[in-house]
Image: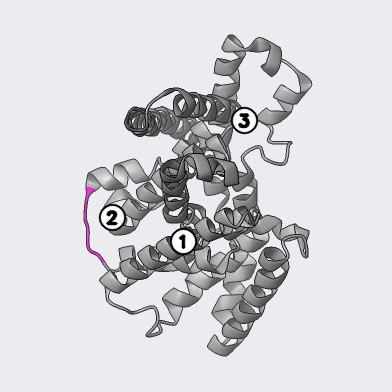
Amino acid sequence: MKNEHVRDSNMELLRIIAMLLVMVVHADFRALGIPVFEEVQTNPFSSSFRFLTESFSIISVNVFVLLSGWYGIKFKLDRLWEFLFQVFFFSIFLFVVYSLVNPEECLTLSGGASILLLKQWDYWFVKAYMGLYLFAPVINSFIENASKKQVQIFLISFYLFQTVYAWISPNGAAFFQTGYSSISFIGLYMLARYIRLYPSPIWRLAYYWDLMIYIIIALFTTFVVLILVYCNISLVGHLYNYTSPLVIISAIYFFLFFTKIQLKSRFVNWIACSCFAVYLLHSNRFGAATYDGLIFEWFHNLSTCSFLLHVTLFILFVFFLAIFLDKVRMCIWCRLYRKNVEKL
């Protein structure tokens, strides 16, 4: 792990914002579902706002993977053990807490299996990222030894294949899982490495153009989605897949915007090094049930302004609770790691 003083605070700020956007995505379509034709007809303002929110926030996961590609993953066993310790710290913590509240659901074979992430959607990002992490040395070796043209050919071929068989035809190559997979992460990782190693005019636009492209794509996506819904065409979720070219391009330019700003902040770095804990806290099987359930209940029982206020404060509360818990986890890890090093 980088020392705090050498971290790029502009990119660490991006990490924080991306995690907040993950929480927004989960508070939108995951908790409330995708607005359907009838809902858009009866409540057009609310539905349009939710589509707009999703259009701006759906880039979050791709941004996290681009960050890994930008800096490159250096495979180290101690980093891997620390990552796994963080994952299972939160997995076990949430299992214990939820067992006290709802033992009938937790104290079962299914509940126990969730601790080890044995089900498909148990911390899906963790498992997809682990696949990327394990393959990183091979990917890095290819990029370091291949020519620029060879990397270009690979990326063009990869994204043509992914677009056709994992976006236009989502079931054409099921192993892509519409972006919820290690193979999609590998493509994003290599794309970020390529952008950093081989600067091109399309990546070196002024920072305000990067931001403008991101905003235009989000607005365009919302516009297209609304047309599809009003025409009662069931392709809405399709446009929000992580394999969507628009989502990927939007994520790239949002990411590039942060590479071009300057920021140095110890506080930002201190928060950012624990922000992955936010995902672990609210996207665990048990944590997600509470997170989604409360937001769903508020949406159906509160006025629009009251709902937005509740959700905003709740997101901030969960965010800083996760940061606090992770600082505790880091103290425990440091003591355990130090003891093991001393034994060696």
Q: Confirm whether the magenta stretch covers residue 297.
A: no
316 or 55: nearer the viewer:
55
Q: For residue 126, what is the image quadrant?
A: top right
Q: Which residues are magenta?
A: 261-265
Residue 114 locus on image (x, y percent): 69, 30
Residue named by callout 1: 223
Residue 319 rendering spot, x and y as whole percentages: 38, 34
Label 3: few (<14), some (14–19) or many (≥20) C-alpha neighbours in 10 Å = many
Q: Secondary structure at mark 2?
A: helix
Q: Pointer 2: what residue?
A: 9
Residue for point 61% across, 64% down: 186
Q: Who comes first in sequence, dot 2 or dot 1?
A: 2
Q: Residue at x 36, y 45 (%)?
A: 272
Indicate which disc residue 99 carries. none
Residue type beneath disc 3: Arg
**Is residue 293 visible in this depiction of the protein?**
yes
Above or below: residue 113 compared with residue 272: above
Q: Residue at x 44, y 65 (%)?
A: 220
- Ranked by sequence position, the earlier of labels 3 and 1 is 1
- Separation (CA) of disc 3 from disc 1: 33 Å
